[in-house]
Amino acid sequence: HLPLFSHWNPERVLIVGGGDGMLLQEVCRHKEVRHITLVEIDPMVIYASKNILNFVSQDLYDDPRVEIVHADGAEYIQDP
């Protein structure tokens, strides 16, 4: 929450890694955020989070603000 509270207008957020959804869940609580890009290299991490671990709601990944990109985070940052 601290980075979002310290920014004057956090409309777009990039999460690199974090396919378990814990950080995504916290970012989604901020209604001023309009778009969240979640970059996760391994699709199985998101699958496991949704279907096995149940750390967060399965609906979290279906939030219309969330874009999931399966890619290496370092490469994505260099060429989104």
Image (cartoon, helix red, strand yellow):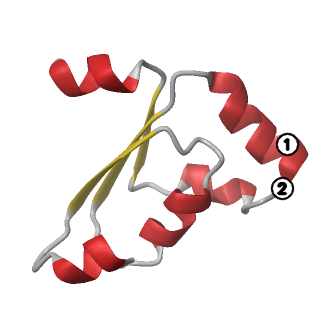
List the single residue furthest toward the left.
8
* Tag 2: amino acid: Asn
Is 53 or 62 nearer to us in this picture? 53
* Tag 1: amino acid: Asn
* CA gap, disc 1 and disc 2: 6 Å
Q: Mark 1 touching mark 2, by CB under 8 A? A: no
Q: Which mark is residue 64?
A: none
Q: Which mark is residue 51?
A: 1
Quadrant position of the C terminus in the picture: top left
Image position of 7 (left or right of 29): left
Q: Quadrant of the rendered structure where residue 10 is? A: bottom left
Q: Secondary structure at mark 1?
A: helix
For disc 2, the marked residue is 54
Badge 1: few (under 14), some or many (20 or more) residues near its Cα, within 10 Å?
few
Q: Number of marks in the image?
A: 2
- What percent of the width, then of the height, locates residue 76? 28, 22
Q: Secondary structure at mark 2?
A: loop
